[in-house]
């Protein structure tokens, strides 16, 4: 590895996402402008033509995600980016990508809702929508960067996961990270691990498009290769043909769920600090985790045994990690910018082994370390 | 027994289809495959995309790469497919509700961009798959489950809309004019640009039955009585063409196509990047009309 050759830049979160996407091989972007995500599409509009990629501004977010999924079906790595209202509009077609097992990356730069809400300010209130926004069962993968560097790194990871598991992957950024400028190290293309979707090894006559091996992820033939695959959002059999047979449907849903759940240990990532001697662990993610870590460090200076857990993967939820920590600490404090979403997941994961407290801040302003310190003192007095 | 040349393009393992006896969809599948076969179109390089509805089920019966997407979004999916791989022939099958209601924005904007997608709209004058509710093209006065006192909305002319939006080729036929339909599909396939072909198609089950037309023969007679050619309709006033079904070619013109223009943009952007001092937009004439 050659550190000198790496480019160092001063970027905002939205631009870092674009850098990451292009490094990951993204060559198709479709979008519709919305604050605070628009810089992503503006930057894509500038950069993609220069490398022979495709940029299109669609007529709405329904069209954006549809075009991106269509592009992915032809073998291109495709992405769209949006914020709250646009993310809501995308849900039905995210469901199609889950059902047809199409790799796709969606960036949701979270802002305050519901409705038009707080367009220019941050929130973390789309956690549950990310997982349950589309109708029906099915899993998604969601990653939440907490720094501009992670905006870049996790976007690369998002493409890799999308390709590996043939599924939509959502990058959950927020309005603070979107416009925050930080120093970023841009890796050299040679040092990045790039995962490509599995392709068929059998000739078209023998190919069964939705038959998976033990990985549960079937190889993917792309449009125009001669495999003549039928993709449908209807319940389908291994041949891709529609059927409402209950047993077939159960098998299909079990497989597309299990391909994520069974690999959760491989997919999830998180960071911890000062866990060993902690009595109280702060749990946070995204931009909120920054203040949480600050307050943790400050609290330790003041003699409180506080630890810190930053969730990097939100879906699948790192429940084993949370559970393990809950076995060693007595209390947990979940910090998020919403009225309580991840806190429910933490409570479920701890199975009552630790007391779970919740402190939220809604209104678009970031947490201040002093506010969190106050909570720490209250809990640990 | 003579086996139809169409048969070899069908997914025989999926037959019989879900379509009702007397449905017009079969004739439209036949016409499409005949046109593609006559042109010797490479089916391996052809992708068929559809939304949700009876018409949406068409691609699943044909041996091509196909996507049966979500209601209204077929044209948006097709836009992504065509742009990502302009080598592919992209054909969309859609219903009147799919295109004229829930998906109308994608239809209008794809026509505006003039992207090289061929849309075949099966207009059966109602929402058929959901059991027969009125659509934007249901005739005034017609009985459907959601117009139990007669439809108070009128027939929406999707062809006029496609012309106004900027499509390269637009035509409407009924299933009566099957040879004209085949000719139109062939013309569209050879054309570079957005092509919209509307086919008025009998739905005896959900439209005919409820409007005193039990069979597709009666429906076809109903179409025949109202047909008027684009040419004959020309000099007539709005009043005079009310209740008529205008058939024929609405437009056939050469316009810049989107994926071609995009290829130019790639070249221009790369050149501009190397010569950043050049002021913007000079490469394109500012046009407000085609
Ligand atoms: C978002 C959404 N809304 C409603 C439906 C239910 N739905 C399925 S098909 C259809 C109408 C179909 O009418 P049309 O597009 O004219 O096609 P046809 O069945 O007549 O061929 C509707 C309303 C749906 N599938 N998705
Ligand atoms: S309901 Fe109508 S359109 Fe649908 S298959 Fe039957 S006849 Fe055809």
Image (spheres, rainbow, N blue to C red):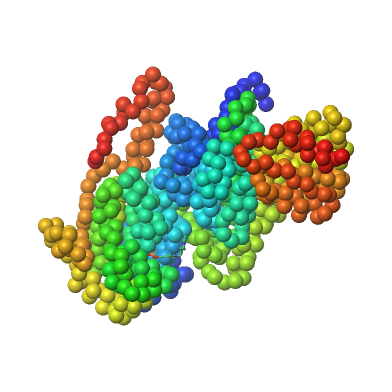
Residue B124 lies, in percent from the top left, at: 33, 68
Above or below for A103 versus A192 = below
Q: Residue furthest left?
A: B235
Q: Position of residue A204 (x, y in %)?
A: 50, 57
Assign the C terminus of chain A to one quadrant of the image: top right
Number of callouts: 0
Residue at x 70%, y 37% (from the top left corner): A289
Q: Is residue B7 above or below residue B1?
A: above
Nearer-the-camera pick, B22 or A107: A107
Instruction: Evaluate whether residue B64 shows in this view.
Output: no
* Residue at x 34%, y 78% (from the top left corner): B210
Tell which of A291 and A381 is nearer to you. A381
Query: Is B78 or A75 nearer to us in this picture?
Result: B78
Is residue A34 shown above or below B4?
Answer: above
Residue A266 picture location, percent across and down: 71, 47
Is residue B134 at all visible to an observer of this figure?
Answer: yes
Q: Residue at x 60, y 27 (%)?
A: A181
Residue A197 coordinates in the image, percent (x, y): 58, 47
Quadrant of res A14: top right
Q: Residue at x 29, y 80 (%)?
A: B212
Nearest the viewer among B42 and A54 is A54
Q: Quadrant of the N terminus of chain A?
A: top right
């Amino acid at each position: 590895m050659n550190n000198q050759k790496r480019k160092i830049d001063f970027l905002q979160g939205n631009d870092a996402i674009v850098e990451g996407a292009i490094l990951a091989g993204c060559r198709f972007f479709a979008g519709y402008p919305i604050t605070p995500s628009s810089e992503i599409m503006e930057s894509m509009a500038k950069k993609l033509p220069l490398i022979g990629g495709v940029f299109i501004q669609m007529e709405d977010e329904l069209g954006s995600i549809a075009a991106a999924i269509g592009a992915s079906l032809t073998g291109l790595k495709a992405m769209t980016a949006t914020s709250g209202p646009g993310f809501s509009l995308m849900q039905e077609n995210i469901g199609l990508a889950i059902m047809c097992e199409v790799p796709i990356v969606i960036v949701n730069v979270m802002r305050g809702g519901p409705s038009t809400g707080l367009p220019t300010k941050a929130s973390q209130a789309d956690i549950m929508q990310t997982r349950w926004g589309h109708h029906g069962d099915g899993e998604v993968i969601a990653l939440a960067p907490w720094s501009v560097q992670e905006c870049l790194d996790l976007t690369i990871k998002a493409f890799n996961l999308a390709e590996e598991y043939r599924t939509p992957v959502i990058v959950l950024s927020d309005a603070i990270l979107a416009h925050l400028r930080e120093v970023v190290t841009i890796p050299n293309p040679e040092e990045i691990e790039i995962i490509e979707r599995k392709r068929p090894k059998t000739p078209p006559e023998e190919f069964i498009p939705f038959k998976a091996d033990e990985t549960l992820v079937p190889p993917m033939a792309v449009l125009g290769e001669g495999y003549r695959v039928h993709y449908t959002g209807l319940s389908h059999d291994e041949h891709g043909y529609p059927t409402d047979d209950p047993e077939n449907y159960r098998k299909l849903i079990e497989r597309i769920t299990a391909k994520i759940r069974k690999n959760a240990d491989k997919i999830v990532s998180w960071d911890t600090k000062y866990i060993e001697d902690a009595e109280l662990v702060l749990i946070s993610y995204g931009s909120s985790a920054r203040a949480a870590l600050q307050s943790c460090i400050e609290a330790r200076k003041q003699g409180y045994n506080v630890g810190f857990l930053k969730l990097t993967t939100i879906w699948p939820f790192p429940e084993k990690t949370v559970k393990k920590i809950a076995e060693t600490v007595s209390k947990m404090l979940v910090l998020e910018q919403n009225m309580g979403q991840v806190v429910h997941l933490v409570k479920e994961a701890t199975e009552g082994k630790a007391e779970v407290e919740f402190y939220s801040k809604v209104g678009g302003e970031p947490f201040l370390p002093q506010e969190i310190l106050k909570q720490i003192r209250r809990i640990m007095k | 027994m003579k086996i139809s040349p169409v048969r070899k393009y069908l997914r025989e393992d999926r037959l019989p289809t879900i379509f009702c006896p007397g449905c017009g969809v079969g004739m439209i599948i036949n016409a499409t495959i005949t046109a593609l076969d006559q042109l010797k179109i490479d089916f391996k390089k052809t992708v068929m995309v559809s939304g949700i509805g009876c018409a949406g089920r068409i691609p699943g019966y044909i041996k091509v790469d196909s996507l049966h997407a979500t209601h209204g979004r077929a044209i948006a999916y097709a836009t992504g497919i065509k742009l990502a791989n302009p080598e592919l022939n992209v054909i969309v099958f859609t219903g009147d509700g799919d295109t004229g209601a829930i998906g109308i924005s994608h239809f209008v904007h794809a026509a505006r961009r003039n992207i090289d997608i061929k849309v075949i709209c099966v207009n059966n004058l109602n929402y058929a798959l959901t059991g027969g509710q009125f659509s934007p093209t249901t005739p005034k006065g017609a009985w459907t489950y959601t117009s139990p006192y007669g439809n108070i909305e009128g027939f929406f002319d999707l062809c006029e809309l496609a012309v106004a939006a900027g499509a390269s080729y637009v035509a409407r036929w009924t299933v009566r004019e099957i040879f004209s339909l085949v000719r139109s599909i062939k013309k569209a396939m050879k054309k570079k640009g957005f092509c919209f072909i509307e086919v008025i198609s009998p739905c005896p089950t959900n439209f005919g039955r409820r409007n005193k037309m039990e069979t597709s023969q009666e429906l076809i007679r109903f179409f025949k009585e109202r047909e008027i050619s684009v040419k004959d309709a020309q000099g007539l006033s709005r009043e005079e063409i009310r209740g008529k079904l205008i058939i024929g070619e609405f437009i056939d013109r050469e316009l810049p196509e989107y994926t071609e223009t995009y290829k130019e943009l790639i070249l221009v952007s790369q050149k501009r990047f190397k010569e950043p001092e050049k002021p913007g937009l000079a490469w394109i004439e500012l046009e407000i009309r085609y």
